[in-house]
Image (spheres, rainbow, N blue to C red):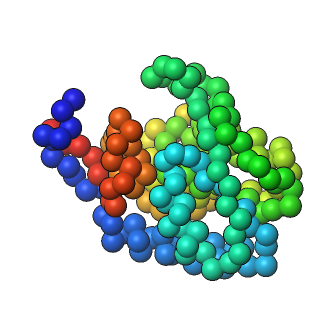
Amino acid sequence: MDVESKRREVVVSKEEIERRVAELGAQITREYEGKNLLVVSLMKGSFIFAADLVRKIDLPVRIEFMTTSSYGHGEQSTGKLKIVHDLSVDCSEFDVLIVDDITDTAITMSEVVRILGERNPKSIKACVLLDKPSRRKVDYTADYIGFEIPDKFIVGYGLNYGDYYRNIDHVFAFVD
């Protein structure tokens, strides 16, 4: 697919993202006041959202990164989650907030919540920028959601197409 010749449809604008990230940061600040907050950014897609979000959380925050894979060397999910890069901290000392770019099938997020939950954090919640409930394969809804979006292949603001476009400051879909 020659994407450079395709038209782009903005799904969530830069301004909408900035506004919603500030709202989420304020809400998380209120709800985690007095707690020992550990933000776990699921790599690679969430790195831009997580960076913007933690700057809007007005509390001391520890940040860790976790990389997972369910694809192996193929293009289809194996259905089994593999931890490629794990946390370097004991979760039992923290209230854990997992941050991801998108929840669609919810397989990854539900499995990460289960795995980290077994490590006995004081609490565990999830925050996603984008939610695509029409694609669910497991019953899971994040605790904090930026935007609910339609079932389109989206790119930008951390989400990639062929390992490119993560740096775009808004979320868009290619259109014919």
Picture quadrant where residue 85 is located: top right
Height in image: 61 above or below 176? below
The answer to whether residue 50 is seen in the rendering is yes
Q: At 59% from the left edge and 48% from the top edge, which residue is drawn?
A: 42
Residue 20, quarter of the rendered image: bottom left
Coordinates of residue 89 in the picture (x, y in percent): 80, 53
* Residue 67, horizontal then vertical, whole percent: 61, 41
- How many labels sit on residues? 0
Instruction: Say whether residue 27 is visible.
Output: no
Q: Quadrant of the N terminus?
A: top left
At 40% across and 66% down in the image, what residue appears?
17
Residue at 36% x, 69% y is 16
Work out whether 22 lies above or below 42.
below
73, above or below 164, in the image: above
Q: Quick check: 125 left or right of 132? A: right
**Relative vertical location of residue 63 with respect to residue 84 in this rendering, above or below:** below
Q: Position of residue 119 (x, y in %)?
A: 84, 47
Question: Depth check: 43 or 148 in front?
Answer: 43
Instruction: Estimate the x, y position of residue 46 in percent, counting from the top left.
Output: 52, 52
Q: Residue at image x 86%, y 56%? A: 92
Q: Is residue 32 left or right of residue 121?
A: left
